[in-house]
Amino acid sequence: MSDSRGLSRRRFIALASGLTLPAAWAGCRSRPASGDGAAVSIKLADHPALGAEGGFVTLDSRGAAPAMLLVRDGEAVRAFANLCTHAACPLLPDAADGVIHCDRDCGHGSVYSMAGEVIHGPSTRSLYEFESALDETGVELTIQMVLKPA
């Protein structure tokens, strides 16, 4: 489906998601984390790629949790919403170059650091990052469905 201006169904959905999801997730900031399903726990042993610097995994959406990109950044594992902040395209990490690309099929070309900061636009905003923490043993990652402040 496309209209006379060449707006495809995929492009419309991506734009609509890019405009509404950040606003919806921003509303999560004021909600306190609780034991009511507001967190996701991941065992690192189930995702060996996260053991190495720059290692990453993508997780499909589950229940209230959106699709996520998990990236090993030093001693931390960062949890990002798996979408470009410019046009809501999926993200493609490149561990060899140490960067995260906007899906090149979108044609926008935004590039982010493994810490989620914009290196090259058109995006002007860092990736949407969720509060996350490794347990004291470094075995389990808990991701709160609360965005970190930008």
Image (spheres, rainbow, N blue to C red):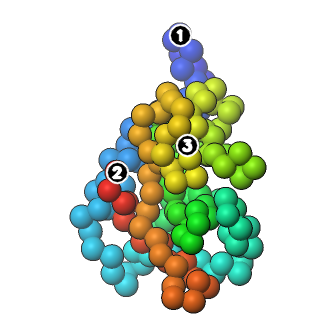
Q: Residue 27 location in percent, x, y?
A: 28, 57
| Local crowd size for mark 2, using a 10 Å CA cut-off: few (<14), some (14–19), many (≥20) | few
Observer-nearest of 61 and 87: 87
* Left or right, residue 59 beside residue 129: right
Q: Which mark is residue 45?
A: none
Q: Nearer the viewer, mark 1 or mark 3?
A: 3
Q: Secondary structure at mark 2?
A: loop
Observer-nearest of 91 and 98: 98
Which residue appears at 58% of the width and 20% of the height? Answer: 2
Residue wearing tag 1 = 4
Q: Residue furthest top?
A: 4
Q: Secondary structure at mark 3?
A: strand
Q: Residue 65 location in percent, x, y?
A: 49, 65
Residue wearing tag 3 = 112
**How far is disc 2 from disc 3 in space, using C-alphas?**
14 Å
**How far is disc 1 from disc 3 in space, using C-alphas?**
33 Å
The quarter holding residue 60 reads bottom right
Q: Amino acid at mark 1?
A: Ser
* Left or right, residue 37 beside residue 111: left
Q: Amino acid at mark 3?
A: Tyr
